[in-house]
Image (cartoon, grey):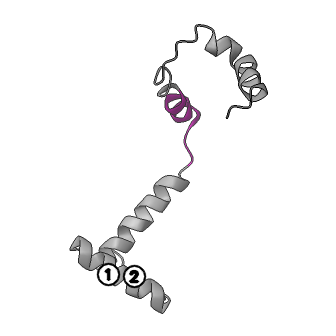
Amino acid sequence: MIRTQIQLTEEQSRRLKQLAEQDGVSVAELIRRSVDRYLRERQHATPDERRERLLSVVGVGSSSVSDLGEGHDRHLAEIYAEGGE
């Protein structure tokens, strides 16, 4: 590991210490976890990864409306015209 020095506000330090105590880990471990999460979120997905993510939601929901996929715009317009959400 590489030692890195950072400056935190008093509030950040206080809250991190509280969370670390609650979780039973060090403040350094919380910061490492936070950095890992940030890096994962900022990572640019390849086109194949984006495609896989998009396809992973196909079929998740269900509806009794037989043409919902093809007529979704019309169905939404009808709902809004009726004053629905």
Residue bearing the label numbered 2:
15
Residue 38 located left or right of residue 1: right
Residue at x 71% of width, y 25% of height: 79
Residue 74 located left or right of residue 6: right
Three-letter amino acid code of the residue under disc 2: Arg
In which quadrant will I find the N terminus?
bottom left
Three-letter amino acid code of the residue under disc 1: Gln
- Classify mark 1: residues with Cα within 10 Å, few (<14), some (14-19) or many (20+): few
Residue 1 appearing in the image: yes
The CA span between labels 2 and 1 is 5 Å
Q: Hey, which quadrant is residue 75 in on the image?
A: top right
Residue 6 appearing in the image: no
Q: Position of residue 61 (x, y in %)?
A: 48, 23
Residue at x 47% of width, y 28% of height: 56
Residue span colored magenta: 44-54
Residue bearing the label numbered 1:
18
Residue 47 located left or right of residue 34: right
Residues at marks 2 and 1 touching, judged by CB atoms closer than 8 Å: yes
Q: Is residue 5 above or below residue 33?
A: below
